[in-house]
Amino acid sequence: MTSPWTNWAGNQTATPTRVARPANAAELGELVRAAAAEGLRVKAVGSGHSFTPAAVTDGVRVELDRMASLVRVDENLVTVQAGMKLSALNATLAAAGLAMPNLGDIDAQTISGALSTGTHGTGAKYGCLSTFVEALTLVTADGTELSCSATQNPDLFAAARVNIGALGVLSTVTLRCAPAFVLRADERPGTLDDVWSGLEEHIAGNDHFEFYWFPYTDRVQLKRNNIVAEADQPLPGWRRWLDDDFLSNSVFGAACRLGRVLPATVPPISRVSASALSARTYTAASHEVFCTPRRVRFVEMEYGLPRAALREAFDGLRRIVAGLPYKIQFPVEVRFTAADDIWLSHGYGRDNAYIAIHQYKGAPYEEYFRRFEELTTPLGGRPHWGKMNFRNAESYAQAYPRFADFTAMRDKLDPNRVFANLYTDRVLG
């Protein structure tokens, strides 16, 4: 069977030769071998929350929705099939009295897609989600299943935890989880002066800190999440609906639609939105605080930077926004993570600050994104692999110290490029 595919943002489409929905690693291996014999390329798709062409193929599209089950729980080690969505993973872990140590703000991705693109949350002591992987298995280009961990095939483990789908198709993932925990969320308006005057304290003094800047203003929303003993201050249902559903989705979506038609309304809308923010503090299970619904569709670019480069990059971004021939409708998100040892992770070998820029679906964005990328590249910027980027393999070889090791692993596992597409051709060579 075959059918057209479109990602969540609608900026990537593909019509494959056929679509496959394996139920297990054996079926996955068979279809990979068959595709290779026919000269067809293979790409697995998750939930389509990447903005890049990472999952685009005219060969065989592999959907992993039948490989989305819990395999086993062994104390705090949880093994799941790679097609499980983060929302289902969070519910599965909660039922076992466990939780992911950290999460991003969207839970619609599959665990395989989130890991393969370097998805992360925020928190000075936490790396990207791939740092929580204890072991994994993947089906390679000859149809065989390989297992790896820090002690078994350690080089493959260092490469496969963030692999952009270029080494094979993940089949199972073992995650080292934390006992279920509660977060106290403190969200309040502030100014850029509030951010810069106390940045180190914000980062070091909170388990999870981030902020959103509203373009055309000096206003921000500060978000601090800290682990507490009990959920003693739940958010009333009406307040959650008002803030996270009605205002953040329905009203914001209407404002974006208006701004796309009447660009002159964007700066005043941004100022009103920033001024209308109110503080809220509440407690809830960790995944309920980390993850919020996102129904307003957009395109996004995100770069990880050495933390020392954040202010220069941010000030440059403000100048870019002020000088664009069109208006930016979405706030800018800034987050922080710890260093890791994963070869293609944007956090390899360094603590990172991240700047994520967005634009509403259907609005112009390319000049904005390209100018931001030109700003961050000489500052040591590395891209989130699931978000838009325009650089090539030669450029990335300078940004990632273990880039050559990763491409050598790719040559070993997939010499005939069964798992390649135009995106991997550009970013990996």
Image (tube, rainbow, N blue to C red):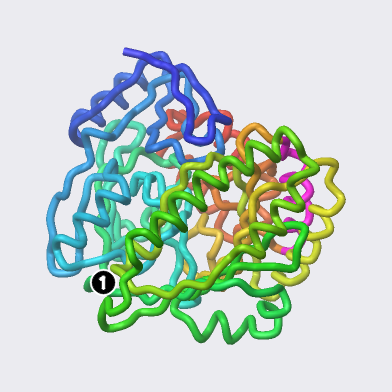
- Where residue 34 appears, as percent x and y from the top left, is 30, 19
Q: Is residue 382 visible?
A: no
- Where residue 8 appears, as percent x and y from the top left, is 48, 35
Image quadrant where one finds the C terminus: top right
The secondary structure that dominates the magenta segment is: helix
Q: Residue at x 28, y 63 (%)?
A: 134
Total number of numbered labels? 1
Residue 231 within the magenta-colored segment of the rendering = no
Q: Secondary structure at mark 1?
A: strand
Q: Residue at x 64, y 57 (%)?
A: 273
Q: Amino acid at mark 1?
A: Ala
Front residue of 216/48: it is: 216
Classify residue 176 as left or right of residue 410: left
Q: Residue at x 45, y 62 (%)?
A: 128
Q: From which residue to which does the magenta span run? A: 364-379
Front residue of 237/338: it is: 237
Q: Is residue 299 above or below residue 356?
A: above
Badge 1 is on which residue? 178
Q: Find residue 425 and report its image quarter.
A: top right
Front residue of 205/242: it is: 242
For label 1, the crowd category at 10 Å Cα-Cα, with few meaning under 14, some 14 to 19 and many 20 or more, is some
Q: Is residue 16 above or below residue 183?
A: above
